[in-house]
Each structure stands twice: as C-alpha cells, then as structure tokens.
Amino acid sequence: MQEDEDFDIEAQGDEAKPLNRKKLLIFVLPVVIVIGLSAGLFYVFNSSYNNSGGSYSIIKNASSDSKSADDVTVFYDLPEITTVLKSDAGSAKERLRIRLNLELGSVEDTKTVEILTPKITDAVIAHTIELTPREISGSGGLYWLKEELLYRINLITNPIKVSNINFRTFEVENAVNTK
C-alpha cells in the first residue's frame, strides 16, 4: 500500500509543462501572416470577386489638328443594378437587370464618377422601381428611360458632363419567389 502512495506522489510531481510562448509565436505567427497575405492578395488580384465596377475604356477620337485631352472618349462601367419593377394590377412581379456605361470627356472625370457611383446607383434604382414593364417596353420606352437616366446622372455629376449612357445589359425577367 505504501508503494501505491509513493507512485501517486511521483505522478503529481511530473505535471505537464506549460507551452513556451516564444516557441508558440515563432511557429504560429508566420503561418497566420502567410495565410492572411495570400488571402488578401487573392481577393485584390482576382477580378471575379471585384464587382465594384470602376473599369473604363478609352477611345481616341479622330482629329488631325490638335492633340488635347478633349480628343478622347472614356466609357466608364457601372456595376450591375437589379430592381423589381412596379407590377400592374394582378400581374406577376418582374425584375429589371441593367448594366450601364457612361461616356465621359476625360480620364480625370473617372475619379469623380467612381466616388459618386453609390449616388448614381441609388438614383437609377429610385427611378426604375417606379416603372412598370409596359413603360419600358419597346424602343420608345428604352429611349425615354435612357434620356431620363442621363438627365438624373448629369444632375449628380455636375460639373462633369456625361455625354451619353449605353446599356450593356438590359433584361426584364419574371421574379420568382423561392421562399
């Protein structure tokens, strides 16, 4: 019986040593840093995760005399906008998906438009949710929508002049509730 008690006393003396914090930092910290950097670089350089719009194309206008900054047209792409259209009495709800690009006069204007993109998106949504599918059907309705959006966007971007709006995508589809 005495021997059993001695064995218990020896076991109590050999308690587990606490982890050394320096060793823990030396091994864990670099792993965390590498994972963080690789995830950050992946999201920065992977364009499929970047839906902020912000891309633009520059086209030089044909002019033989001057080489000024006014000889370019910049097409600034806005992100995709999806809204639910106002429904006629008793009809199913329909959804409008549009992607726009704005024609600007200079590359410097893209910085201002990029800052104002949330206001532009809000103005487009606020206008389109009040429309019915009948109002925007056909070429006349599309032309009217284009002119109305151009007017509203020019109010927001003043003093920058948006010379035209181009529809990159314009789809009216039935909204399906999946509840």
Image: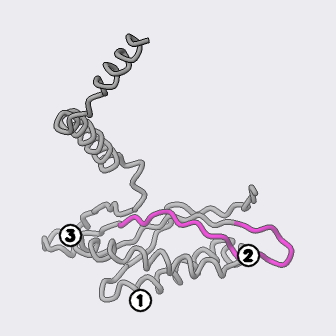
Residue drawn at x 30%, y 27% is: 16
Residue drawn at x 40%, y 86% is: 156
| Eye-nearest disc, 2 or 1 | 1
Residue drawn at x 34%, y 88% is: 158
Q: Who is closer to the viewer here, 41 or 16?
A: 16
- State whether the magenta stretch is mostly helix, strand or loop: loop
Q: Residues within 10 Å of mark 3 (few under 14, many from 20)?
A: few
- Give the magenta range: 76-94
Q: Are marks 2 and 1 in contact (CB under 8 Å)?
A: no
Mark 1, secondary structure of its residue: helix
Q: Earlier in the sequence, mark 2 or mark 1?
A: 2
Give x and y (percent) for residue 174.
Answer: 73, 61
Q: Which mark is residue 63?
A: 3
Q: Which mark is residue 155?
A: 1
Q: Which mark is residue 134?
A: 2
The answer to whether residue 34 is magenta is: no
Task: From this view, report whether residue 161 is shown above or below residue 63.
Answer: below
